[in-house]
Amino acid sequence: MAALKEKRTCGQRCEDFGRFVWNSDNGTLFGRTPEKWVYISLYYVAFYVVMTGLFCLAIWTLMYTLDPYTPDYQDRLPSPGVMVWPDKYDEEHIVITYNSSDKVSVSKMSSCLHNFLGQYNDTLQKDCDHNCTKGKYFMQHNFLPGTHTKESCSFSVSQLGNCSGLHDPTFGYNCDMPCVIIKMNRIINYLPSKNNTQDIQVNCTVLEGEENVKKIEYFPENALMDRSYFPYYGKLAQPNYLNPLVAVRISLTGKRSAKFQCRVVADKITYENIHDPYEGKVVFTLQNLHVPSSPSSVHHHSSAL
């Protein structure tokens, strides 16, 4: 029978560990001589220096090839999206409901539009509108000296006429003539039309409830988005840029509810993409929940008195 291994005491174990840390007989530290530790340390220092240098070189190369003013890839944006304000978006469609007899409802809708149009204040655009020629694309091939930016054309909220909120702070939501604002999203270096002759125009049609729509009005006149606001060169190049807007005032009647489609019409803007319902157009329902008393009910009430 093999002899049982002698059980080592705690003191012996500590002595063995101490000899492993420093062995004076062999001159080793943790099992290696100081010379080998120097070689290993130099190897790992050189290894991580090289790896860090390669990583920094890769990042520098990537950043060097990127243009801070223009995205490298825009192939997924053949046409800009279109949005409507007040922005009452849900998962499926846009339903703008209000009650013209409810002060809280009117205040909610008008506050939404006032907040959105706050950035179009004339005072905030005092640095804009340089060399802008209406009706022509504002092409800028060079940056301004010193600031390395490009000029932007101003868009005054007064251009929205009766839907500017300057004359009617409720934007028509206290009656049956509410205003909605159409905005086209930005795409860098995008020109909506192929030349300087075709207008960029908003056109709204009634999809459902045509009998409930008395009139549709546009502001600015002819529902135009002037070509001088295009192309857009990016937020870094044009920090003062504001999208051109078109306001639509809709006169409701009858049941005071209708569904609309508003398109931005230009030869390079598509709107039939089934995978993107907001490309080139926006569809929304506008409804006034206020139900006025009918003449017959008023007459019946007066007779009863």
Image (cartoon, helix red, strand yellow):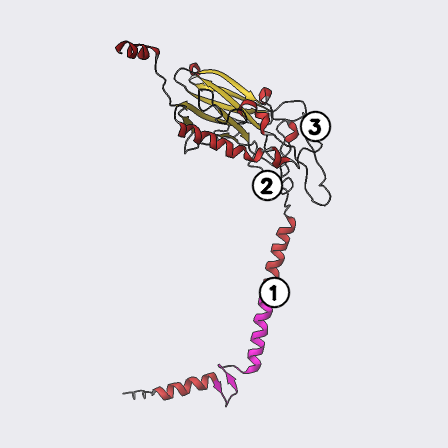
Q: Amino acid at mark 2?
A: Tyr
Residue 23 in sight in this render: yes
Q: What residue is drawn where x is 64% and y is 53%?
A: 61
How far across and how far down the image is residue 183, in percent? 54, 30
Q: Nearer the viewer, residue 68 or 257?
A: 257
- Is 34 positioned to the left or the right of 5 in the image? right
Part of the protein shown in magenta: 22-49
On screen, residue 292 above or below 275:
above
Q: Is residue 220 magenta?
A: no
The verdict on residue 23 being magenta is yes
Quadrant occupied by the C terminus: top left
Residue that carries the numbered disc 3 in the rendered image = 133
Q: In the rendered structure, which disc, 2 or 3, sits on the residue that comes first in sequence?
A: 2
* Residue shown at 47% from the left, 20% from the top: 177
Callout 2 environment at 10 Å: few (<14), some (14 to 19), or many (20+)? few
Residue lying at 55% horizontally and 78% vertically, measured from the top left: 37
Residue annotated with mark 1: 50
Separation of disc 2 and disc 3 at Cα? 30 Å
Q: Position of residue 229 (x, y in %)?
A: 64, 31
Q: Nearer the viewer, mark 3 or mark 1?
A: 3
- Between the C-alphas of marks 3 and 1, the distance is 56 Å
**Pointers 3 and 1 in contact (CB under 8 A)?**
no
The residue to which callout 2 is attached is 73
Picture quadrant of residue 45: bottom right
Nearer-N-terminus badge (3/1): 1
Real-space Cα separation, disc 1 to disc 2, in angstroms:
32 Å
Query: In this rendering, which labeled residue sits more in front, label 2 or label 3?
Result: 3
Tag 2 secondary structure? loop
Tell me the SS state at disc 3. Answer: loop
Query: Looking at the picture, which amino acid does disc 1 mark?
Result: Val
The disc labelled 3 sits on which kind of residue? Thr
